[in-house]
Amino acid sequence: MTTHYDDSFGLTTTWDDNGNARIRITGDLDWDTAEELTRTAADCLRTEPAPRRLRLDCEHLTLCDSLGLASLLMIHRHATEVGTRLHLTNRPAALQRLFETTGTSHVFGDAASDAHDTDRGNGGEQGHAAAARAPRPPAQP
Amino acid sequence: MRAPCPVLVADAVGVVVEANARAAALFPEPLRGARLADVAPSWLAEAHQRVVLTGEDSTEPVRGRHAQWSLEGHATLGPDGTVVWWLADDTERARTQAALRSEQERNAFLTEASTQMLASLNLDRCTELAVTLAAEHLADAAVLVAPAAGKRHPLAIGFDGSVSHRSLQMDPSTVPGLAEALQGFPPVPSRWIDPAVLPDWAVPDGFTGPVGSVVVTPLPGPGFPAGALILLRRSGRDAFGPAEETFARVFAARAGAALSAARLYQGQADVTATLMADLLPPLLRQAQGVEFAGGYRTAKDTERVGGDFYDVHPGAGPDDEILAVLGDVCGKGLDAAVLTGKIRNTLQALLPMADDHQKLLALLNGALINSRHTRFATLVLASVLRQGSLTRLRLTSAGHPAPLILRRDGTVREAATSGTLIGVLPDIRSTTVEASLAPGETCLLFTDGVTEAKGGPLGEAMFGEERLRAALGECAGLPAEAVVERVQMLVSEWIDDNRHDDIAVMAITAPHTTHLAAVDGHTPGRYTA
């Protein structure tokens, strides 16, 4: 095999000093892992006060199946309930295609604007968590 | 002669010339001057003869029994032709060895029994094995009393190499210890059970002679007992001793674990079978002469009910639209099966709305939305109506891969329909497209299990839409069934042994036949081949 995928799944949660949360998703979002993302995002959204924005960084997302999509829809539902804006940044083409096929693009907003969406007062997509809120430990895979 | 063990000296003709006090204590007869053959056990006298004849010390000790002891004799040859016999009491060692041997045999038996019983998840097979092994290795006969199913207890009776089954309405308290064993309490010691009070059903037909001793032991399972085991021995045989009772309990524990596993599995298999009966894709058929063929391959997992489904609902009358549905439910296993069942039932009820796909989907969506989860379904609706030589389609995708349309010349194009998945979002949108099929042309509905099937030369590439289109392009003019078979075959070859999701395809093919409309053009028509 010429291609080799590292199939370890990981979630890294960071907070910036504006009270915005970011979860970086690494690996396949599927039957085995979707529940973990739902839980991790729910933990973020449960904080008081709720984050203004929750970014799911999909740059290292290698696959998203129907349960992965169900998880994203659940996170969107939670976020809407607590008034948090959800952004899916760095969407791989396959993820965007999945949104289009399933008619859910409008739910997750504009991919183009999310792609360039940066944290004000922060280092953008590099994920430098500032000091106001300590970075949280990565979720256990 | 002082020695830490019994010592005898006998001369070449077998007469004892010397014996120490320990030897004297061992043999009651006076030793000195007596013939060895008269005072010592024969195995020792014979060994003595052998040593004298060969003129060689025995390198290996000789062993034998004497009264309640087990003795070991070592010979040393004296210069004057006498043989010195050093005797050691190895009674304890022999007993330990025998115990070890029987312990090893029991362990080997238990391991083998466990392996055999756990190898089968079939409850009947597992039950038969348990009683056969128990009857063969632990007792003369074994009766397995399963927990009551309704009012009756299923019984499996192992005796004389065969197993018979019956079910019986009985009072467990008629066998001492049985009621307790069936509740999983520790067994009553065997000596407390009077074999004479056993009811007839507990003694196998053909069991000759009275029952000598009985053991009743629970078959423990995780959470609830898997039944009880009654072991019977004939009166002529040794009664069950405490060690054997313990052994029977250990055996019963293993049997109970195996039976419980089989019972749980069977329970799950029954539930699945019940659901399957309702959820398996129907055999498709013709309606209005239009061919409908479906193919379904479930994911290669233990959970056999998948998340893909299809249905064809013929219209109320022969000139009414036929509604074909193919869909995919998020997830797998029971959750997916339950959601699939809900969707199919709801769609059935919503059939009168089928002339308006948007309305039907909105109602279906409303029926499925659930605050607890975001499990969704994607599906394609195809309303089919035959009009003269054309077959008209209305196609709507609700978040599902769009159907492909295969023309007579082999061109394949995607129907331009798209929409929102069903069951999560309060507002859904979709677009419906119309298409018409000339005779022999096909519309293919499929789930993403087809395009996302991983395989190929490197095992990692998706089958993809391009390959699907190419495969379909080669099917121009084929009947629906052949199109489905061809697509399925190519996808199967592609997947080979790789893991895959559910795969469902449905072909709708316009008939080559001519519609012979009745005279007034309104009454049901006939079709010619």
Image (cartoon, grey):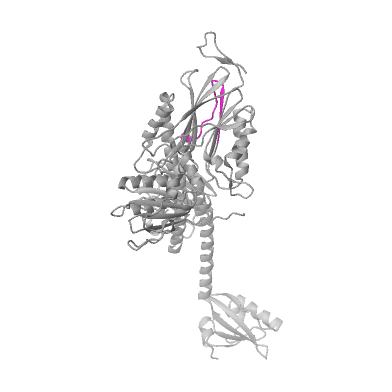
> Is residue A7 rendered to the left or right of residue B246?
right
Q: Residue at x 47, y 40 (%)?
A: A100
Compared with B389, B402 (above or below) is below
Look at the image and tell me in which quarter the C terminus of chain B lies: top right
Give the residue at the far right of this rendering.
Answer: B54
Could you say which is closer to the camera, residue B123 or residue B269? B269
Give the x, y percent position of residue B28: 52, 81
Magenta residue check for B285: yes
Instruction: Tell whether B242 sits left or right of B384.
Output: left
Q: Looking at the picture, how far across and down is residue A101, in whole percent?
A: 48, 39
- Residue B85: x, y in percent? 60, 84
- Residue B367 position in % (x across, y down): 37, 34
Region of the chain picked out in magenta, as a range: B278-295
Q: Is residue B296 above or below residue B516?
A: below
Left or right of B253, for residue B292: right
Q: Nearer the viewer, residue A125 or B353?
A: A125
| Residue A11 falls inside the magenta stretch | no
Count of residue discs: 0
Task: Pick whichever, B396 or B217, lies toward us.
Answer: B396
**Is residue B212 in sight in this rendering?**
no
Q: Is residue A89 above or below residue B325?
A: below
Asked if B358 appears above or below A125 in the picture, the reply is above
For the N terminus of chain B, give its image quadrant: bottom right
Q: Among all residues in the image, which is located at the extreme top?
A: B519
Q: Nearer the viewer, residue B526 or B59?
A: B526
Looking at the image, the residue that sits furthest to the front is A121
**Residue A73 appears anywhere in the view:** yes
